Image (cartoon, helix red, strand yellow):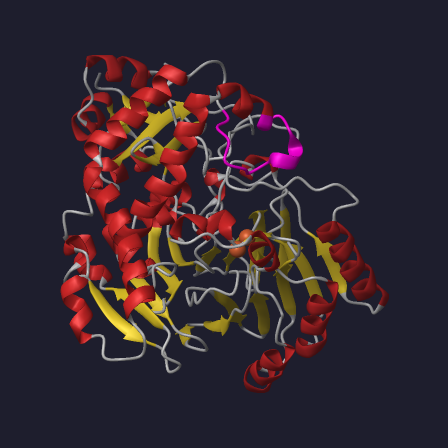
């Protein structure tokens, strides 16, 4: 009881909202409400009606990432229970979702270019005071949400939040956007809001010891929970982390778009998505390969494979500053990451605008405009980052799609050449509705939806970037190929997949010109002199 314990390095900690895996659209009240009615309830209804269809669909690679529950065995009764609970306890959010539909309909019917003032009285009651009605310069009506007030309203209910602890021993996890996390009898659910500091006490235990009594009290575990929780603990000290101690810098690839750049006195972590530590054939860096404190975490954009709550929450107590792109100010599809993170207990959230710079001792971070990959929706919350360290320059472009090469000419004129380019080339991309569908209140026709893809740069667009910045090294990353990230991705490529063909071509052309080029997978380490 008085012995010191650590959390085992393979203890997985899944943040949940009402039993569903917490991703960034499940936190802001308005996007949460829409996902609840248009994603979760629909999938639950469909599963209850025909669980066989779901079981067959999740085995079909062509339907990967589709609206199908990946549950072992017959879970109809459990899903029915979750559905009943949702309908009973979340009536307020269901009402909010329906009110957003009504507001959209009201604007379509009555906002014809004349003053909008008279329409305020007709805004559905529960949205009154939380919206401003506006036109663009061409008389197209829209509303903007006053997000800070919505977080303070009864619509933001952090009693929906919890974290689920269990042990993980392999890369297999179901795709989280369409499968709720049901208890399998081997997990402990801690009911605490994400902002709770007791979670930091828990997460610290991966590196700092704690007694059983201390952590039991912090988490408020009951006898049954405590029994199971004990199996997650170990007295074995974690492997110590050796910081980079050279005169230059070092970057390490952790998978997808997650890269750690370190100098002797500074650490920067981009788009943190981390694997737990367990036996595997694919070598990788994990949670154990991070410095005690991370000076800057940089988030490129609000897609679930780039802002991952599961990783971020566990690192919260180690993050000094977290840098996010500024949002557009109230559009339903563009919630503020700053507000969202602050609501979830993050301190020192720094919001950056396009071309804004954050200087530090031996260099700087510059937010670089990021176009495309968002289905042509007006989403401002996206940024590439240029890092300068001593005389090195590296640009992390994530899923930036070079749909306007002229923009990069202008950027190059301001920022100059860049040594190293990191670029995602997921150039087919899902249709816009894959992420944003639940936010639409009117059906979009299939051909339109399929023309507006969440797609990154193809060969032509990528090589234009390489040429513009006169890069000496090019790394294709953010391809979603690490198997431990399947649960937030939905892509499995073969040699014949277009993104592989396009990125192979980029690598070949770059190499033929003497440019170092590689598609990253698993892990990689590079030292900068
Ligand atoms: Fe993306
Ligand atoms: Fe991505």
Residue placed most toward the observer, 63 or 522: 63
From the viewer's perspective, is residue 178 above or below residue 371?
A: above
What x and y, as percent, mark residue 462? 69, 66
Left or right of residue 344, residue 451 in this image: right
Magenta residues, dominant SS class: loop
Q: Residue at x 46, y 14 (%)?
A: 74
Residue 159 place in picture, x, y as percent: 19, 36
- Can residue 346 be found in the magenta stretch? no
Q: For the N terminus, give its image quadrant.
A: top left
Residue at image point 50% right, 41% down: 488
Query: Foreground residue, 307 or 53?
Result: 53
Name the outermost residue toward the right: 512
The stretch in magenta equals: 57-70
Label total for image: 0
Q: Quadrant of residue 223?
A: top left
For the C terminus, the quadrant is bottom right
Report the front residue among 161 and 232: 161
In the rendered view, would you say 396 is above or below 18?
below
Q: Is residue 59 magenta?
A: yes
| Residue located at (75% from left, 57% from top) | 502
* 486 w.r.t. 184: above or below: below
Coordinates of residue 64 in the picture (x, y in percent): 59, 36
- The x and y percentages for residue 192 are 22, 34
């Amino acid at each position: 009881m008085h012995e010191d314990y650590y959390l085992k390095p393979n203890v997985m900690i899944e943040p949940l909202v009402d039993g569903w895996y917490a991703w960034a659209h499940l936190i802001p009240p308005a996007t949460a409400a829409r996902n609840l009615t248009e994603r979760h309830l629909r999938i639950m209804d469909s599963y209850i009606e025909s669980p066989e269809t779901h079981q067959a669909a999740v085995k079909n690679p062509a339907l990967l990432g589709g609206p199908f529950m990946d549950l072992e065995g017959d879970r109809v009764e459990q899903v029915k229970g979750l559905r009943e609970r949702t309908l009973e306890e979340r009536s307020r959010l269901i009402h909010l979702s329906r009110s957003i539909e009504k507001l959209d309909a009201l604007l379509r019917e009555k906002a014809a270019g004349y003053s909008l003032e008279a329409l305020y009285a007709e805004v559905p009651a529960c949205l009154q005071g939380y919206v401003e009605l506006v036109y663009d310069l061409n008389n197209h009506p829209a509303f903007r949400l006053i997000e800070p007030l919505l977080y303070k309203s009864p619509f933001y209910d952090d009693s929906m939040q919890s974290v689920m602890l269990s042990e993980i021993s392999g890369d297999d996890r179901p795709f989280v956007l369409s499968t709720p996390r049901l208890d399998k009898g081997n997990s402990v659910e801690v009911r605490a809001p994400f902002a709770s500091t007791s979670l930091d006490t828990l997460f610290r235990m991966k590196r700092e010891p704690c007694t059983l009594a201390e952590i039991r009290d912090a988490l408020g575990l009951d006898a049954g929970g405590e029994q199971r929780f004990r199996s997650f603990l170990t007295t074995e000290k974690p492997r110590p982390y050796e910081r980079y101690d050279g005169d230059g810098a070092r970057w390490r690839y952790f998978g997808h778009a997650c890269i750690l750049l370190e100098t002797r006195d500074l650490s920067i972590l981009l788009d943190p998505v981390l694997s737990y530590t367990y036996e595997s054939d694919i070598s990788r860096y994990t949670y154990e390969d991070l410095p005690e404190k991370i000076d800057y975490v940089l988030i490129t954009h609000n897609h679930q494979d780039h802002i991952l709550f599961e990783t971020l929450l566990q690192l919260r107590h180690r993050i000094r500053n977290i840098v996010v792109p500024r949002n557009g100010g109230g559009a339903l599809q563009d919630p503020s990451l700053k507000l969202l993170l602050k609501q979830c207990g993050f301190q020192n959230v720094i919001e950056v605008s396009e071309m804004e710079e954050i200087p530090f001792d031996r260099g700087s971070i510059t937010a670089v405009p990021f176009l495309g990959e968002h289905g042509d929706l007006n989403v401002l919350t996206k940024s590439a980052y240029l890092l300068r360290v001593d005389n090195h320059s590296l640009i992390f472009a994530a899923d930036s799609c070079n749909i306007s090469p002229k923009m990069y000419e202008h950027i190059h004129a301001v920022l100059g050449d860049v040594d190293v380019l990191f670029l995602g080339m997921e150039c087919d991309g899902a249709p816009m509705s894959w992420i944003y569908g639940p936010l639409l209140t009117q059906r979009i026709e299939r051909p339109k939806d399929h023309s507006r893809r969440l797609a990154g740069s193809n060969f032509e667009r990528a090589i234009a970037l390489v040429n513009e910045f006169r890069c000496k090294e090019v790394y294709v990353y953010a391809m979603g190929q690490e198997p431990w990230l399947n649960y937030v991705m939905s892509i499995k490529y073969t040699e014949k997949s277009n993104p592989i063909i396009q990125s192979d071509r980029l690598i070949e052309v770059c190499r033929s010109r003497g440019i170092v080029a590689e598609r990253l997978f698993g892990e990689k380490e590079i030292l900068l002199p």
